[in-house]
């Protein structure tokens, strides 16, 4: 009997609607490098959803590539990016941003979210030319621990960026789950961010992220940087078609809402069982704390990630739901949690 899968939200292929559109258009001939009609239509649709007609939209293959290309394009050689200690670019991208020549500076955070006073402190600690110059504030929505910035929190970060002369850049690998969880819109995010990307890899697409550059001052020659850093896809139409499919009828948000709803099934079971959390969340990532015995019982039937071992020997784990998680699968894990 196969195990229930709660390891991540990209372990499946793609939503059947996406696969259907790819198959229907498989033998069509188009130009390359994202200049095809599907990509152009997807870009226009995303600009419309964001309420930013002047924005540029670029299709990227994956999150690390998107982050490296954008941050390399936005900073001069002596400039640095600010992030939370747990920020993806600081922990899980193998030093890719730093390999591009830009230091990552850690700011104080709470619940995975960068604090405005932390940003100010980092900027104050780098006052002259003998140090790197902070230029970009990097945040993730949702964060690496499944928490979400509210609009008020984003506005506060926008204000500190304006105060300190920083670019606000948002990693949106799990943007769909975050927006649905807090009732935020793409237009709301676009009203405060200079640049962000819409994650497709972790929300129903085979691959792909849609980079939205809102600030016109950051747009010049961006395609040159994509090509220079190896991020330009010859078969760009595949990514464009997938995003067009996801956004034509707002299925992107429906898929994210389903992932969150399946997480809610698990969350309710965890709460009923009285299990503590390493971090409380409202998105499709959950971080309950188990005893070794409970972990052994669940891991025999379900695949999930062990996030870390606490000093007392208990295990913090991560359950992740996705567009493909069925209610039967979620109920099976919920029942198993209740039986611990």
Image (cartoon, rainbow, N blue to C red):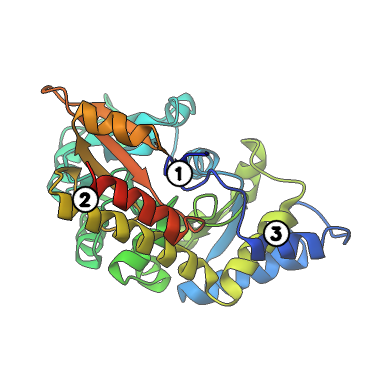
Dividing the picture into quadrants, the one containing residue 15 is bottom right
Q: In whole angstroms, how far apart are the C-alphas of marks 3 and 1?
A: 23 Å
Q: Earlier in the sequence, mark 2 or mark 3?
A: 3
Q: In the rendered view of the protein, which quadrant contains the C terminus?
A: top left
Q: Position of residue 193 (x, y in %)?
A: 37, 60
Secondary structure beneath dot 2 equals helix
Secondary structure beneath dot 3 equals helix
Looking at the image, residue 324 lies above or below residue 289: below
Left or right: residue 76 compared with residue 69 = left
Question: Which residue is label 1 attached to?
Answer: 4
Residue displayed at 12% across by 48% down: 274
Crowding near the residue tagged with mark 3, few <14, some 14–19, many ≥20 C-alpha atoms within 10 Å? some
Secondary structure beneath dot 1 equals strand
Crowding near the residue tagged with mark 2, few <14, some 14–19, many ≥20 C-alpha atoms within 10 Å? many
Residue displayed at 23% across by 58% down: 268
Q: Position of residue 254 (x, y in %)?
A: 47, 70
Residue displayed at 71% across by 45% down: 233
Q: Position of residue 41 (x, y in %)?
A: 68, 71
Q: Earlier in the sequence, mark 3 or mark 1?
A: 1
Q: Position of residue 156 (x, y in %)?
A: 19, 60
Question: Which residue is label 3 attached to?
Answer: 19
In this view, the residue in front, 146 or 336, is 336
Question: Which residue is label 2 attached to?
Answer: 270
């Amino acid at each position: 009997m196969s195990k229930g899968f709660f390891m991540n939200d990209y372990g499946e292929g793609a939503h059947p609607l996406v696969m259907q559109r790819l198959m229907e258009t498989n033998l069509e001939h188009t130009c390359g490098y994202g200049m095809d009609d599907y990509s152009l239509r997807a870009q226009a649709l995303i600009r419309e959803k964001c309420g930013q007609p002047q924005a540029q939209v670029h299709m990227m293959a994956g999150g690390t590539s998107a982050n490296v290309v954008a941050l390399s394009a936005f900073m001069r050689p002596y400039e640095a990016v600010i992030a939370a200690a747990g920020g993806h670019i600081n922990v899980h991208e193998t030093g890719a941003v730093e390999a591009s020549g830009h230091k990552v500076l850690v700011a104080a955070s709470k619940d995975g979210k960068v604090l405005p006073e932390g940003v100010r402190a980092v900027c104050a600690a780098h006052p002259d030319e003998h140090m790197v110059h902070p230029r970009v504030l990097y945040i993730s929505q949702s964060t690496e621990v499944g928490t979400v910035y509210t609009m008020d929190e984003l506005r506060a970060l926008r204000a500190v960026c304006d105060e300190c002369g920083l670019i606000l850049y948002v990693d949106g690998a799990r943007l769909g789950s975050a927006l649905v969880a807090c009732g935020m819109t793409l237009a709301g995010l676009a009203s405060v961010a200079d640049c962000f990307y819409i994650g497709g890899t972790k929300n129903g697409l085979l691959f792909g992220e849609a980079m939205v550059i809102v600030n016109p001052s950051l747009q010049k020659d961006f395609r040159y940087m994509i090509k220079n850093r190896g991020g330009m896809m010859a078969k760009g139409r595949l990514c464009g078609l997938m995003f067009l499919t996801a956004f034509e009828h707002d299925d992107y948000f429906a898929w994210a809402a389903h992932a969150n709803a399946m997480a809610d099934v698990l969350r309710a079971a965890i709460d009923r069982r009285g299990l503590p959390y390493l971090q409380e969340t409202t998105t499709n990532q959950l971080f309950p704390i188990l005893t070794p015995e409970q972990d052994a019982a669940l891991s025999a039937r379900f695949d999930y990630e062990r996030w870390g071992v606490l000093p007392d020997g208990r295990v913090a784990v991560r359950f992740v739901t996705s567009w493909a998680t069925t209610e039967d699968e979620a109920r099976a894990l919920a029942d198993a949690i209740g039986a611990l």
